């Protein structure tokens, strides 16, 4: 069991190194626009898996109101977020075709969420940095702990020394991004339900682990 856990950690670290080598590390507040949108991402990916065409999938989602959203602006923001996370250059991660077929499989929703979580982190340098620089070290050291707003603000204050774009953020943007990030952690299963701010180390499910392992082997 310990050997499997070490291998899982090695696999995760390998993806992080590849992302670090290929990513642009400028921070943006993109997460605050729509948040995790896991359910919406799964709907869009499922339709894409069936049609094989992003435009066709979008048109069906709009025509049948599959996202169940009333605002066209909100729907367009979701489309942009999903396309940026899953249909851009995914680098070391499996392609949009592969992940869409994976989402269509009859597997637990939590496995699909753990898979999509990697794409959110990969596409958003700030999310990935807060995960690896703040959340990860806390969980590695304590297993479970509380993630307070003060810890978040102090961490971003430190990051602003090397990222001047953060210094242009207003207090409203900082607060909104924090709320969206905490919601992202809750939807992913890393943070307990509100109002709790307890975080815990998630158990990696076999389906996403195998999915990324095969992706890595195929890439090599």
Image: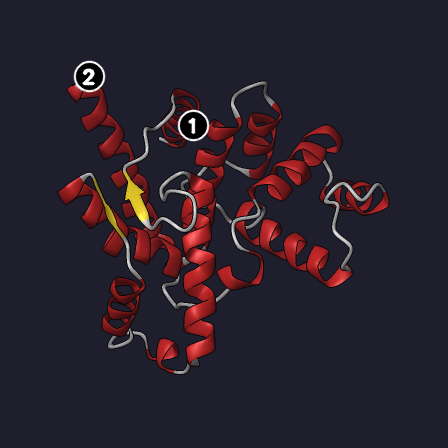
- The residue lying furthest to the right in this view is 63
Residue that mark 1 sits on? 208
Q: Distance between the residues labelled 1 and 2?
A: 17 Å
Locate the N terminus and report the quarter of the image it occupies: top left
Left or right for 12, reference 121: left
Q: In which quarter of the image is residue 57?
A: top right
User: Which residue is more in the foreground, 163 or 146?
Assistant: 146
Residue 92 appears in the figure = yes
Residue 104, numbered circle: none
The residue under the point 60% across, 32% down is: 100
- The residue lying furthest to the left in this view is 141
Colouring chosen for the image of the structure: secondary structure
Residue 121, compared with residue 179, is above or below; it is above
Residue that mark 2 sits on? 1
Q: Quadrant of residue 201?
A: top left
User: Which residue is more in the foreground, 194 or 213?
Assistant: 194
Give residue 123's position: percent from left, percent from top.
Answer: 46, 53
How many numbered marks appear?
2
Say which element carries label 1: helix
Left or right for 67, reference 112: right
Residue 23 appears in the figure = no
The residue under the point 25% across, 55% down is: 134
Give residue 194's position: percent from left, percent from top.
Answer: 43, 49
Give residue 209's position: percent from left, percent from top.
Answer: 37, 26
Give residue 179's position: percent from left, percent from top.
Answer: 45, 61
Left or right for 55, reference 201: right
Say which element carries label 2: loop
The residue under the point 62% across, 25% down is: 104
| Mark 1 vs 2, N-terminal side | 2
Within 10 Å of disc 1 (Cα), the crowding (few <14, some 14-19, many 20+) is some
Locate the C terminus and report the quarter of the image it occupies: top left
The residue under the point 16% across, 21% down is: 2
């Amino acid at each position: 069991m310990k050997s499997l856990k070490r291998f899982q950690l090695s696999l995760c670290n390998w993806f992080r190194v590849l992302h670090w080598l290929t990513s642009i590390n400028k921070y943006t507040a993109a997460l605050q626009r729509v948040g995790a949108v896991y359910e919406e991402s799964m709907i869009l990916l499922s339709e894409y898996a069936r049609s094989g065409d992003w435009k066709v999938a979008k048109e069906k989602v709009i025509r049948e109101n599959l996202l169940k959203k009333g605002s066209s602006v909100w729907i367009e923001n979701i489309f942009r977020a999903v396309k940026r996370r899953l249909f851009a250059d995914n680098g070391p991660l499996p392609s949009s075709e592969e992940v869409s077929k994976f989402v269509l499989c009859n597997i637990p929703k939590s496995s699909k969420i753990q898979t999509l979580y990697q794409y959110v982190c990969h596409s958003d340098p700030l999310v990935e940095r807060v995960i690896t620089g703040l959340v990860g070290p806390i969980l590695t050291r304590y297993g479970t702990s509380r993630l307070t707003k003060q810890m978040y603000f102090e961490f971003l204050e430190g990051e602003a020394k090397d990222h001047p774009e953060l210094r242009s953020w207003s207090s409203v943007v900082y607060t909104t991004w924090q709320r969206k990030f905490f919601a992202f952690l809750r939807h992913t299963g890393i943070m307990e339900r509100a109002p709790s701010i307890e975080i815990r180390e998630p158990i990696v499910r076999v389906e996403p682990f195998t999915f990324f392992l095969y992706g890595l082997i195929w890439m090599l």
